[in-house]
Image (cartoon, rainbow, N blue to C red):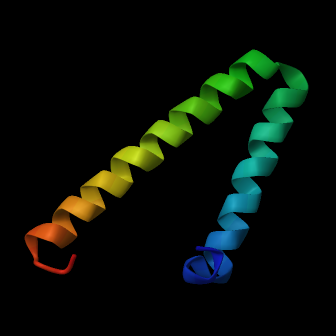
Amino acid sequence: MLDKLGPFGLVGILVLLAGIGLIAYANYVIAAGIALVLVGLGLVVKSLVSSVLQSFGMM
């Protein structure tokens, strides 16, 4: 999976994790909530992309 992201994707993941870590340093409950929101958003985007690709017959 990581080879498909490319260098910008890897940097994006590192920045995302660093941001959640910084928030967790201040308050771990808020960091957990933000992490759950990001995971949910990722799942929604993945399902939308899969749906669009399926409608074009690419999957």
Q: Is residue 35 left or right of residue 18?
A: left
Of residue 47 and residue 22, the one placed in the foreground of this image is 47
Identify the residue at horizontal 68%, vertical 81% (top origin).
7
Percent coordinates x, y for residue 44 in the rendering: 35, 45
Identify the residue at horizontal 66%, vertical 64% (top origin).
12
Q: Is residue 43 left or right of residue 32?
A: left
- Of the 4 image quadrants, the one containing the C terminus is bottom left
**Which quadrant would residue 35 be assigned to in this image?**
top right
Of residue 33 and residue 58, the one placed in the foreground of this image is 58
**Which quadrant would residue 52 be assigned to in this image?**
bottom left
Q: Is residue 37 left or right of residue 44?
A: right
**Which quadrant would residue 38 be assigned to in this image?**
top right
Percent coordinates x, y for residue 46 in the rendering: 37, 56
Total marks drawn?
0
In the depicted structure, whether residue 27 falls above or below residue 13: above
Percent coordinates x, y for residue 58 in the rendering: 19, 80
Identify the residue at horizontal 16%, vertical 69% (top origin).
54
In the depicted structure, whether residue 47 falls above or below residue 21: below
- Of the 4 image quadrants, the one containing the N terminus is bottom right
Percent coordinates x, y for residue 30 in the rendering: 70, 20
In the picture as drawn, the residue positioned furthest to the right comes out as 25
Identify the residue at horizontal 83%, vertical 29% (top origin).
24
